[in-house]
Image: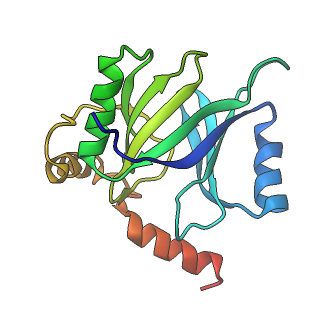
Amino acid sequence: MTQPRAYLSHVVLFCHDFDAMLKFYTEEIGFHLSDIGEARGQQMAFITLDPSLEHHQVALVGGRKGSDAGALHHLAFGVRTLQELHERHEHLKARNVPGIELWTHASMLSVYYRDIENNRLEFFLETPFYVKQPIAAQLDVDLSASQESVFRQIEDKYKDEPSFDLMSNWKARTALQRNGG
């Protein structure tokens, strides 16, 4: 089977000092804070250098323990269609890749898995929706269904969230705010 193309999208880092790391990335490097909150008992911040392009290029996660604990939470690779995500998922299952989990973040549909050294990796498809992050819910859709029907299910699940909007609207609004508009 020919593998669909994927692109590196974002890196997620575990932090010893969440607040200091967030301050460093936003104040010293110039990242924009897209969202901040808590999921699964951990502080999370989603930051980007260009909100008109990406909701987040780096995510910071609090709770890193000990000096020997690794900083990498996971690497994420984007795909362009639901069919590509489904093919990636089937490929991983066929090869008995460990740690396969399906999650939704409302703005993304994700297939998480582990490499042979237990590093966490992700293939994901962006949805057209924005919902304030973090959201981490098990994905309960059929990846072999049509992209339109799956997106409709995600919309139905999250449309009552106060922050629900189209991602394109969020990007435009955030770019205006960032540029003083």
In this view of the protein, which residue sits in the foreground, 83 or 150?
A: 83
Q: Residue at x 76, y 58 (%)?
A: 26
Is residue 105 visible in the rendered image? The answer is no
Residue 76 x, y percent position in the rendering: 52, 41
Q: Is residue 170 above or below residue 180?
A: above
Q: Quadrant of the N terminus?
A: top left
Q: Residue at x 80, y 30 (%)?
A: 16
Q: Residue at x 57, y 37 (%)?
A: 75
Q: Residue furthest bottom?
A: 181
Specify whether 175 is left or right of 110.
right
Residue 11 x, y percent position in the rendering: 62, 43
**Color theme of the render:** rainbow
Q: Residue furthest front?
A: 2
In this view of the protein, which residue sits in the foreground, 66 or 37?
A: 66
Q: Quadrant of the C terminus?
A: bottom right
Question: In the rendered image, which quarter is residue 15 located in?
Answer: top right
Is residue 103 visible in the rendered image? The answer is yes
Residue 31 x, y percent position in the rendering: 71, 61
Number of numbered discs on residues: 0
Q: Residue at x 45, y 68 (%)?
A: 170
Residue 174 x, y percent position in the rendering: 54, 71
Specify whether 3 is left or right of 38.
left
